Amino acid sequence: MSQKEQMLHDIGIVDFVLVDLMLYLDTHPFDRSAMEYFNHYNRIKNQMVKEFSERFFPLTKDYAESDEEWRWGMAPLPWEGEC
């Protein structure tokens, strides 16, 4: 597995954890421990997405900005087989 694939895989894992925590928090909105976990993993995911976007291509429009070039169009398209 390439470094790009590994980073995307890891981002997917953390994203799954966040979705699971969001579902839990929907039914337990006052669970402070779960909220702390959510905030912790959300910070981790944001950092991972930022690092990936700087090395390869932006995953969201939030990371498409650059002083040198517009990077949003650099990602492979779904029919190109990399997504």
Image (cartoon, rainbow, N blue to C red):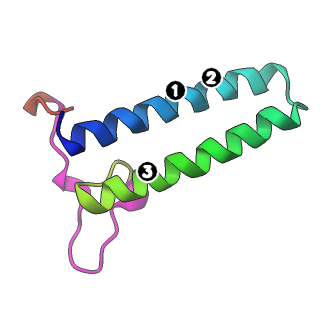
Residue 63 on image: x %, y %: 38, 60
Q: Position of residue 14 (x, y in %)?
A: 50, 35
User: Which residue corresponds to mark 3?
Assistant: 48
Between the residue at mark 1 and the residue at mark 2, the CA separation in whole angstroms equals 6 Å
Secondary structure of residue under mark 3: helix
Q: CA distance from mark 3 to mark 2?
A: 18 Å
Q: Nearer the viewer, residue 28 or 80?
A: 28
Of helix, strand and loop, which one carries label 1? Answer: helix
User: How would you rate the neighbour count of disc 3 (Cα within 10 Å): few for under 14, some for 14-19, many for 20 or more?
Assistant: some
- Residue 80, labelled with which disc? none
Q: Is residue 33 left or right of residue 18?
A: right
Q: Amino acid at mark 3?
A: Met
Asked if residue 23 is positioned above or below residue 52 in the image, the reply reads above
**Residue with the mark numbered 1:** 16
Q: Which residue appears farthest toward the right when viewing the image?
A: 30
Q: What segment carries the magenta color?
A: 61-78
Name the quarter where the C terminus is drawn.
top left
For the point 77% across and 42% down, the residue is 36
Please say if the residues under marks 1 and 2 sit with CB atoms less than 8 Å apart.
Answer: yes
Q: Could you classify mark 2 by the number of other residues whose Cα lies within 10 Å: few (under 14), some (14-19), or many (20 or more)? A: few
Q: Identify which residue is drawn at 85% across, 23% down.
A: 28
Residue 23 versus residue 59 in the image, above or below: above
Q: What residue is pinned by disc 2?
A: 20
Locate residue 65, reporting x and y percent. 34, 68
